[in-house]
Structures are given as C-alpha cells and as structure tokens.
Image (tube, rainbow, N blue to C red):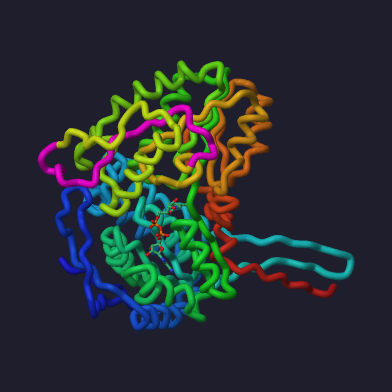
Amino acid sequence: MKIDHLIGGKAQAGRDYFPTVNPATQEVLAEVASGGEAEVQAAVAAAKAAFPAWAGMPAPQRARLIRRLGDLVAAHVPAIARTETDDTGQVIAQTGKQLVPRAADNFHYFAEMCTRVDGHTYPTETHLNYTLFHPVGVCALISPWNVPFMTATWKVAPCLAFGNTAVLKMSELSPLTAARLGELALEAGIPPGVLNIVHGWGREAGEPLVRHPDVRAISFTGSTATGNRIVQQAGLKKFSMELGGKSPFVVFDDADLARALDAAVFMIFSNNGERCTAGSRILVQQSIYADFVQKFVERAGRITVGDPLDEKTIIGPMISQAHLAKVRSYIELGPKEGAMLLCGGLDAPLLPDRVKKGNYVMPTVFADVDNRMRIAQDEIFGPVACLIPFRDEPDAIRIANDIAYGLSSYVWTENIGRAHRVAAAVEAGMCFVNSQNVRDLRQPFGGTKASGTGREGGTWSYEVFLEPKNVAVSL
Ligand code: NAD
C-alpha cells in the first residue's frame, strides 16, 4: 500500500517513500510519501488559496461539514482503530473504545462551538469597545506518534471549525490514520485545500512548514526538544506547544488506597506508558509507603503484556526499536542510580507467536527512587513507574515541583483543605484530585515550564486558532 500527500484535495505522490512498520510484528504496513520543501510550499499555497472562501462561509454551514466529518469518523471507528493499533501498537481496547470515539467527539464538539463564538464588550463614558474573533489563516498542525489520530483531530477540529485552513504533518512513525482522515474530510464535503496533509520527517517536512511565512499559527504536540527548536525556527507566529511531561502522582496517607492504587497503575501503564500525562513519579507518604509499594507491585505483576489486537492486552509494543532501546536504557540505569527494581526489568515477556518480534518491554517498577535520579527527572515515555517516598505535605510539594516539566499532576487525599492547598501549589497545567486523568473537552489542556505554552480545549482553543480584534466606537 502507498500513502501519498493530500494537497489541494488531491493525492500527491512522493518523490521518495519510507516504510511505516507495525511495531508488534515488524511487518511493513505501507510505503509513505516523504515530503520536503516543495510539498510544503504546495500545501501551504493550497491552504492559503482555500482560506478566504472557508473563512467566509457562515459558521452554521461550516459546522454542518465538520459535524459530518465527525459522523464519518464515528461510523468507521472499528477500521480506524484497527489501523491505529497496527501503526502504533496502542492496544485495541484503548483505540477502539476510547481514542477513536474521542476523535469523533472532537469534531462534534467544535462543530457546535464554532456557531457560538461570542465576544466581550467594554463600555466607557466615551467609547463602546467590543471584540471580534477572526480566523488566523493557514495553520501548521504537527502531531506526535503516541495517540496520533486523537491528537490530530484535537487540532484539526477547532482549526477548521473556526474558519482556518491547515497543513497537517503527522509523525513519520504513525501516519496511517491521518491519511484516512484526509479522505473522510473530502467525503464529508470539506472543500479541497482546507485540510492538507504532508507526510515526512521532522527536519525535512516539519521544519519548512513551521518556517513558512504564510503559516500564521503552529499547534504542535511533541517533545520539549523539538518544541524548543520550532520556536527558534518559526519566527513570529501564534504558538500552542504541548510538550513532554513527568507528572507527579501524590498519595497521602489518608487517601482511599484502593482507588489510588488503581489510578496509579492506570496512569503509568495505560497507553503502553507512552502518554504525555503519565503519572510517572508516584510520590507516597512514608507512613503508607511499604504497604502501597507491595500492593502496587502486585497489581503491576498482573498486567497483561501481549498482542495489541487482543481486547485483554493492557501493554502492547513500544512504537519503534529506537524507542524500545531508550526505555530499556532507563531500566538498566535505575539500579545503577540506586533504585530498587521490584518488578519487570529487561527480561522479555512471554508473547503469542504473532507478536514475538515486537518491541516489547515488561511493566517495570522502581521503588526507593530519589527524585534527583535521572529515572525520576527524564521523560522515559514507557511503562516504567518510579515510587518516591515523602514525609509530609511541604515535602510532597517540594518533590512534585523539583522537575523541569509541569504538564499534569494528581493528588490523592481525603483531607479537603490539603487537596486544595496542594492543587494550588503544584506547578502544572492540570491537577486531578482523587482522580485519574479525565478529559472534558472544555477544560484548558496544556502545560507549564518545559511542558509547553498555550492551552487548547473549549474557548482556550481561541488562543491559537482565533485572532481577537478590539473595535472601539466613539459615542
Ligand atoms: P517529536 O518531538 O520527536 O516529534 C513530534 C512531531 O514533530 C513529529 O511529527 C515530528 O516529525 C515533528 N518534528 C520533529 N522535528 C521537527 C522540526 N525540527 N520541525 C518541525 N517538526 C518536527 O515527539 P514524538 O517522539 O513524536 O512524541 C513524543 C513526545 O510528545 C513526548 O515528549 C510526549 O510527552 C509528547 N506529547 C505531549 C503531549 C501533550 O499534550 N503535552 C501529548 C502527546 C505527546
């Protein structure tokens, strides 16, 4: 199978192709067009040409097309989920029941929302000020490989619904479902050129895109290193930067332990641990630490590693051999830094024949981790949990914040005052109290510090996809 670029509503062959590989089997799934400067120029030109008519279309009409795209995604959930699982190794229970249905929700939600964009008024004695929101123009949407379809739609839906046109660049490791999205957008009646897709590598396809002077806004999700590079390369544009994380999951001794344990296991091991909001530093109060560690390890030991197409599998393969090597290097590093390996490690898991060549790693638990160790400071982006003891509330806050990142955070306590105090003190874009990560499409999603700038979701998506204008009328 060949996957081509989508430019101006037409499939455009690549000058070169590269393989995309199933990380569970190493089978080549497709040959993907590798784009560069020329394809980016053509795609941005197509998006620019399509912009005036799309931006000028009445919002209810645009909303109908976006809603239709959501309906088409919803109608194709099983096929898209299967492709996503094959391309990424994300387990079918997640892609089929959570991630792809959520992608359809993204279209339905922003279709509704674009008909309700309102403004503000600031009356004075001499002037009436009011706000208009205009679409920005051509937007570059850049997605990582970990939950690519959901992430792409999280960007495409508000971008298009608010009247912008887009050039989407997926990760070279997981381009397949976005290619399907491009087809469905045309089928929904979204005019050619409104959504363009250029495939390829970061430096060859991504960089000319973010540097392009006709690109007015960049919505990027990916690593902190790439985010920094893009900000330096892109010049003056609107940015939304959703970057890496190493989020604290803080459990006080008065927490509902059974629920906290379930959530802690879920937040580090679901999505193969390849999750930006993973609760990868699990901070546990000393008085319950031994008990918590024992129960956490029991639960981790019961996790099914296996074929991502099996509904019972919790952990599938890592996205690539290079990423597997990175995750394994941290598992090797942990004991050298003085952490105690309690579960998992470098031994290969027992696997069904179909996936024996897959990029697998066992769910791994390190206890007695010091927050200054590299396994605690670096984003491993795999199923590796670090358990860190703390003394009291100030100690928990100090450890939680002693990190470059600030994406998500989790606090478990039955003490309502403490819950609010810690939620306020933790340096993160999001804090979940007595809860795993539960996403409402209205909430501001994003991080602080090295986890990024800008927020998306609900009206927060205005920040990147709409341009406010103040009109001051003399009275
Ligand atoms: P990455 O930074 O390597 O790549 C992300 C995307 O950027 C890819 O499409 C890549 O091709 C492109 N790219 C690479 N170099 C580029 C350049 N110079 N110019 C333009 N584009 C370029 O990240 P990844 O390994 O694909 O994804 C994993 C990272 O993404 C993790 O750090 C994870 O935490 C982060 N992430 C963050 C969120 C969030 O919402 N904060 C969500 C998911 C993943």
Residue 189 is covered by the magenta coloring: no
Quick one: 80 or 53, which is closer to the camera? 80
The answer to whether residue 128 is above or below residue 389 is below
Q: Position of residue 228 (x, y in %)?
A: 52, 63
* Residue at horizontal 30 percent and vertical 25 percent from the top: 301
The answer to whether residue 5 is above or below residue 256 is below
List the single residue furthest toward the right: 125
Q: Position of residue 114 (x, y in %)?
A: 52, 60
Q: Which quadrant of the figure contains the C terminus?
A: bottom right
Residue range in magenta is 352-373
- Quadrant of ligand 1: it is bottom left
Task: Answer with left or right where residue 82 lies relative to residue 194.
Answer: left
Main SS, magenta region, reads: loop
* Res 263 → quadrant: top left
* Residue at horizontal 29 percent and vertical 48 percent from the top: 324
* Residue at horizontal 15 percent and vertical 65 percent from the top: 1
